[in-house]
Image: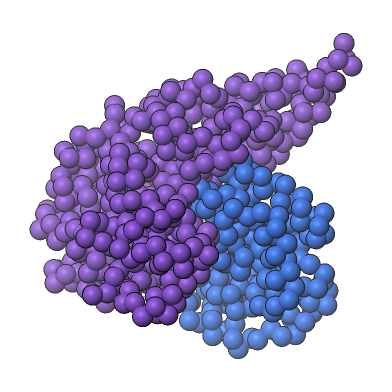
Chain colours: A purple, B blue
Amino acid sequence: MSIRIYVPRDSSALALGAEPVAKAIAQEAQARGLDVTILRNGTRGMVWLEPLVEVETPLGRVGYGPVTTRDVVGLFDAGFLQGADHALHQGIVDEIDWMRAQQRITFARTGVIDPLSIADYRAHGGFDALVKALTMPSTQIVDEVSASGLRGRGGAGFPTGIKWCTAAQVQAEQKYIVCNADEGDSGTFADRMLMEGDPFALIEGMIIAGLAIGATKGFIYIRSEYPHACHVIERALRLAQRAGYLGERIMGSAQSFSIEMRMGAGAYICGEETSLLESLEGKRGQVRAKPPLPAIAGLFGKPTIINNVLTLATVPWIITHGAAAYAHLGSGRSRGTQPFQIAGNVKRGGLMELPFGVSLREIIETYGSGTASGRPLRAVQVGGPLGAYFPAHLLETPLDYESMSAAGGLLGHGGIVLFDDSVDLARQARFAMEFCAIESCGKCTPCRIGSTRGVELIDKISANQEREGNVTVLKDLCETMTEASLCALGGLTPLPVMSALTHFPEDFAPPATAGLAAQ
Amino acid sequence: MNMSMSMAEESFDRARAGELIAAKAGLDGALLPILHDLQKAFDHVPDAALPLIAEALNLSLADVRGVVSFYHDFKREPSGRHVLKICRAESCQAMGVEALVTHLAKAHQLTLGDTSKDGALTIEAVYCLGHCACSPAALFDNEPIGRLSPAMLDELVLQAGETSA
Ligand SMILES: Cc1cc2nc3c(=O)[nH]c(=O)nc-3n(C[C@H](O)[C@H](O)[C@H](O)COP(=O)(O)O)c2cc1C
Ligand code: SF4
Ligand code: FES
């Protein structure tokens, strides 16, 4: 019988050499006359072990990683097809420490199944929720999502049920479901991993959202920096269409739903929902003033639900297992699980899905295992480029929406980026302003002009020009940006800047020699 | 630079552009899909194509120009035969991407946003490629690269010089 070997095709695995490894395994098996089937799964999220090759054995899937082409002959010699010991042997993958303590809901199938096999998807509970939802009154679907406590995973944490309820109640001939797959935050890659590893989960979630609000058309807006995810989604859409899950009369029901994929064009601001809608309409990605809410007048002026990839991909689980099972997990008003992503200067980078409320320290120490450089950890940025820099003494902060905001930061899309002691926080603060200047949509002055002013001010402070005065001006500027920006790009850029200034003032201080000279 | 511009204009295939535009003109919000297809076919969005788009979509030329200029992906002129996009966002900063940028400048006289003199390689800055768990990251002709090192950069520059796209 053919032995099944899994070699990930997730693009981070490819970035670490998975493709030549897959080829080398196929060649070596052929040379030895062995009957193997090579399957291309997504990633389990342990990027530090990629390429992680898994072999199916009677005991479970045994992992070897990180594998290079040079290891392949040795793996065959050692008997890895029987799960034998080897220097790269990691044991049963589900029992690796990193995997064991997780609660995988959104990511239950990613890394496990063949992403482009509907049969595999169905064998792992896929489309069960759709079958169920097709028998439910639409209000009941909305109620279920509301009761689960699910909040938007794109960053703002808005209750998904409320958004859906608003869109459901508006009468309109045409409504839309838009999936926000613009994932622009540094340190985040959960949307990408899900789309590459379990695309049908997203598709199923969108169809259910369509049933819930009475929409028949969906768009997935993926950033162009994700060519592999675009490719997988396009293929998955075609497969789902052919198998009758998309199109007219889905699964033989009276309902219709179709999805188109659209590619972004390299603009961070297009992750902001109204800018994304403008972009989908074929315009410059400029932010719209709210109201009207997109749920009332969104894409082409029609009621539109915009949700993040993870939000939508979590819905099928909630419908299948019930709202209570989901709401049972988490802490405070943050219910369920969050796929966290640890990156930057980290020994073990990757994704782990855990209930809200786990502390930053636990993720950094238990999962990340410290810095990649081996030097002391100095700062942690949570929640992407608009997130705060945390110093060591704030690492006990629980990771949920409320605790993070109480600590002066935000959870965002769940990205955690580590910096060792070589980091210069003044430089990071400058970058935050520079990034805002590069990516500003230009609609409002505090963001467009303020960010450029911010860069200049930080330069002056670093050059020790009228330091105190300029620090005060910088603080004022941050206040103005916070209060007077139309959207969170200008409104939250002060977060990384001010957290750097507050927690790491020494990095903004004049260099020691300059200080002496001045005395 | 002027050379390549004029060559691009000369080689502008109006019929091909027309086909690409017509193929997508019926989509809702057709402009970005059309611009992507032109960018892909011509390796830039030729100026000469803009009036064709405006006409097909019933937009003003100014509107079309405004959209092209808003998005970083749409180029006004062709890139080098190979394109290396280097991530310069926070996670990659934490893993020393700035040192790589310096290395490119010192060892290869290449700066972000520029194309090498022989037209072999264009270097661009991007902000996050979703490979932050193996920073610093890059895309070389759309293929992902993780844990980019100076030695790997040297290799890529060499490879770009030796091969045509
Ligand atoms: C500057 C900016 C960038 C954003 N980028 C993204 C993004 O890449 N992906 C995303 O899902 N949401 C992003 N958001 C949040 C969206 O505006 C919106 O809240 C979200 O798509 C709603 O979906 P959710 O409720 O499922 O989170 C961004 C917001 C801002 C202000
Ligand atoms: S804050 Fe910046 S990005 Fe947001 S609307 Fe204003 S100018 Fe545009
Ligand atoms: S920050 Fe560089 S790949 Fe994400």
The extreme bottom residue here reads B15
Image quadrant holding the N terminus of chain A, namely bottom left
Q: Is residue A498 left or right of residue A209?
A: right
Q: Is residue B61 left or right of residue A394?
A: right
Q: Residue at x 59, y 53 (%)?
A: B147
Q: Is residue B136 left or right of residue A98?
A: right
Q: Is residue B68 left or right of residue B28?
A: right
Number of numbered discs: 0
The vertical placement of A469 against A432, above or below, is above
Percent x, y of residue A54: 35, 60
Q: Residue at x 34, y 45 (%)?
A: A96
The vertical placement of A228 against A189, above or below, is below
Percent x, y of residue A293: 38, 45
Closer to the camera, A49 or A494? A49
Closer to the camera, B1 or A213? B1
Percent x, y of residue A57: 26, 61
